[in-house]
Image: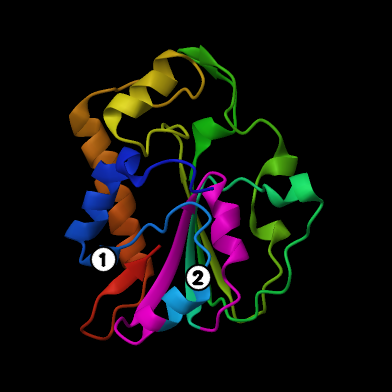
């Protein structure tokens, strides 16, 4: 929900930047999202919202602007249920990309650790999104990775070895680079880029 500093995702964000995406992370409780979107849409072909974990709800809650047609959700958590709030109609979305690390949702035994997202009720998935028939939903699942493997290695290792969020058993830097680059490639492949200008990921 933007509580975390974007620097903990630096390696992943660098992988996106290498794919010619421009990236901006608004500060916590940024108040002028619509104004920001409208200004950026004058310069960039697409404005794409992206959210990890509870940031998925933040992303969805800001998709009521006509300039937002694409959204990327990584292990998204539904924090609207804490306020007993349902997702309103999302008339402008045309593409939703789910990227889910399977170990986020299951008990792990090598090493042992509970799921980071233990209950289906708090998962933000396509069944909770009120979209039109024009919206395409794509899902990718990464069986060997966990909820915090998207973080830089140092932060991810803390979560893995404390068993708060068990991740891939291969904790090498090269494996982190592979995973982050693989995610970036999938995002690039699923975002239309017919025009010669950058996309924008929030």
- What number of labels is visible? 2
Where is residue 186? Give x, y as percent.
34, 58
In front of the other: label 2 or label 1? 2
Q: Is residue 56 part of the magenta span, yes or no?
A: yes
Left or right: where 20 falls relative to 125: left
Q: Residues within 10 Å of mark 2 (few under 14, many from 20)?
A: few
Question: Taking 20 as reference, is 123 above or below it?
Answer: above
Question: Taking 99 as reference, is 137 above or below it?
Answer: below
**Residue nearest the viewer, comparing 134 with 15:** 15
Where is residue 172? Give x, y as percent.
22, 24
Q: Quadrant of residue 39?
A: bottom left
Question: Taking 55 as reference, is 197 above or below it?
Answer: below
Toward the right, the furthest residue is 84
Which residue does the numbered mark 2 point to in the structure image?
32
Question: Taking 172 as reference, is 78 above or below it?
Answer: below
Dot 1 falls on a residue whose secondary structure is: strand
Q: Is residue 55 part of the magenta span, yes or no?
A: yes
Where is residue 49? Give x, y as percent.
46, 65
Left or right: where 146 falls relative to 151: right
**Residue at x 49%, y 16% (from the top left corner):** 163
Q: Earlier in the sequence, mark 2 or mark 1?
A: 1
Q: Residues within 10 Å of mark 1 (few under 14, many from 20)?
A: some
Which residue does the numbered mark 1 point to in the structure image?
21
**Residue at x 42%, y 26% (from the top left corner):** 167
Write down the region rendered in magenta: 39-66
């Amino acid at each position: 929900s933007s509580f975390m500093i974007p620097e903990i995702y630096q390696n992943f964000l660098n992988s996106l930047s290498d794919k010619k995406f421009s990236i901006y992370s608004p500060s916590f409780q940024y108040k002028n999202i619509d104004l920001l979107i409208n200004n950026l849409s004058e310069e960039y072909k697409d404005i794409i919202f992206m959210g990890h974990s509870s940031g998925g709800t933040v992303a969805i809650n800001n998709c009521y602007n006509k300039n937002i047609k694409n959204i990327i959700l990584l292990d998204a958590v539904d924090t609207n249920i804490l306020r007993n709030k349902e997702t309103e109609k999302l008339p402008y979305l045309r593409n939703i990309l789910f990227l889910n690390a399977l170990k986020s949702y299951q008990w792990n035994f090598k090493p042992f650790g509970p799921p980071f997202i233990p209950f289906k009720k708090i998962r933000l998935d396509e069944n909770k999104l009120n979209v039109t028939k024009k919206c395409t939903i794509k899902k990718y699942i990464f069986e060997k990775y966990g909820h915090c493997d998207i973080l830089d290695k140092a932060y991810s290792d803390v979560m893995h070895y404390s068993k708060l969020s068990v991740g891939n058993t291969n904790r090498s830097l090269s494996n982190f680079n592979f995973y982050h680059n693989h995610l970036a490639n999938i995002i690039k492949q699923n975002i239309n880029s017919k025009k010669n200008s950058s996309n924008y990921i929030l």
